Amino acid sequence: MFGLGTQELLIILVLVMIVFGAGKLPQVGGALGKGLRNFKKGMGDANEEIEEADVSEIKKKDDKEEKKED
């Protein structure tokens, strides 16, 4: 996992507990989870918009080509 060993993960966990305290860890974890969920949702929405834009652009090109052929 990202080239981190067990010792590195334990050191990071201890530092997080020192900085935030044991009582705040559930809140920090919840906020991190919500942030990741919103990021994934935003990326999905962006991908949908890009696909819609590509489809509408292709349709416009097809319409222009059909008008030229007439």
Image (cartoon, helix red, strand yellow):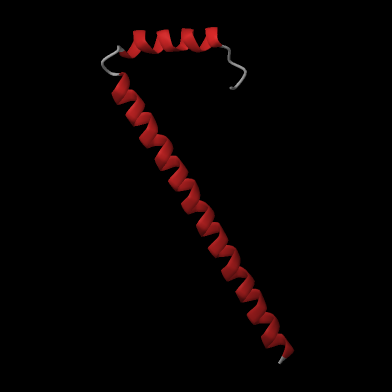
Does 53 appear above or below 34?
below
Given the current orientation, which residue lies at the most extreme left position?
Answer: 23
| Residue at 60 percent of width and 69 percent of height | 57
Q: Position of residue 61 (x, y in %)?
A: 66, 75
State left or right for residue 43 relative to residue 59. Answer: left
Given the current orientation, which residue lies at the most extreme bottom position?
Answer: 70
| Residue at 32 percent of width and 19 percent of height | 25
- Locate residue 16: give its quadrant: top left
Does 28 appear above or below 10?
below
Nearest to the observer: residue 36 or residue 63: 36
Does 7 appear above or below 25?
above
Nearest to the observer: residue 6 or residue 37: 6
| Residue at 57 percent of width and 70 percent of height | 56
| Residue at 29 percent of width and 13 percent of height | 22
Looking at the rendering, in which quadrant would you find the N terminus? top right
Does 17 appear above or below 67?
above
